[in-house]
Image (cartoon, helix red, strand yellow):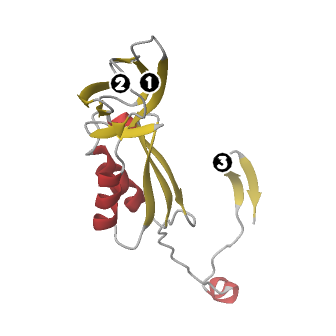
Amino acid sequence: HVFVTIGSSKTIYVPKQFNKVIVVSPDIADVLVLSQGRVQVLGKVAGDTDLVFSDDKGDTFKAVVSVALNAKPVQDALNRELIDEHITASAVNGAIVLSGSTRDATTVNSALEIARKFVKDPNSVINQIQLLGGQQVMLKVQVAEVSRNVIKQLGMDTAFSGKLNNYSVEI
């Protein structure tokens, strides 16, 4: 099995003599014969294909080639920009998958923006980052304490009767 990333190449050594090589899916990878027993495999797009080698007798043998996105530059950028965060980038089926955990949504958005800079289609970045803890909401609360005796001394009536949001309320 040969693994190569999109836009890169890898030299493989073929253990048998061959006079012909065919790439089953030439849209995924290409091959360049360097010498007898050595070929250069070039990754074009994400996917799997076979290289089929044949010799003078018509015998064939194959090598499976998997081409994937290179997640290493994404991971390097995440490590550089989001210090002390536990976010991992990996390549799966032509997409960049972000996983791990963080404590705030801003970091998740930053990680997504960083990863999208490395792909042609922004929809090919998949977010599987766990947001730890709950969302925080800031509330402004005013508390007032009123003594019933003071209200009575002022001559105010504290009785209330009416409807509040379609409910009958009586105090």
Amino acid type, residue under disc 3 in the picture: Asn
Instruction: Give me the residue at 46% from left, 29% from top.
Output: 63
Q: Are marks 3 and 2 in contact (CB under 8 Å)?
A: no
Q: How many marks?
A: 3
Left or right, 151 with reference to 77: right
Amino acid type, residue under disc 1 in the picture: Thr
Q: In this rendering, which labeled residue sits more in front, label 3 or label 1? A: 1
Foreground pick, 29 / 20: 20
Q: Earlier in the sequence, mark 1 or mark 2?
A: 2
Question: Real-space Cα distance between discs 3 and 1?
Answer: 65 Å
Q: Which mark is residue 49?
A: 1
**Residue highlighted by disc 2:** 28
Q: Are marks 1 and 2 in contact (CB under 8 Å)?
A: yes
In this view, 56 is above or below 45: above
Instruction: Give me the residue at 33% from left, 18% from top.
Output: 19
Q: Secondary structure at mark 1?
A: strand
Q: Quadrant of residue 79?
A: bottom left
Amino acid type, residue under disc 2 in the picture: Ile
Instruction: Give me the residue at 43% from left, 37% from top.
Output: 2
Percent of width and height locating residue 168 = 76, 51
Q: Residues within 10 Å of mark 3 (few under 14, many from 20)?
A: few
Percent of width and height locating residue 25 = 39, 17
Q: Residue furthest front?
A: 57
Question: Real-space Cα distance between discs 1 and 2?
Answer: 7 Å
Q: Residue furthest top?
A: 58
Percent of width and height locating residue 117 = 25, 45
Percent of width and height locating residue 77 = 28, 59
Q: Which mark is residue 165?
A: 3
Question: Real-space Cα distance between discs 3 and 2?
Answer: 63 Å
Q: Which mark is residue 84?
A: none
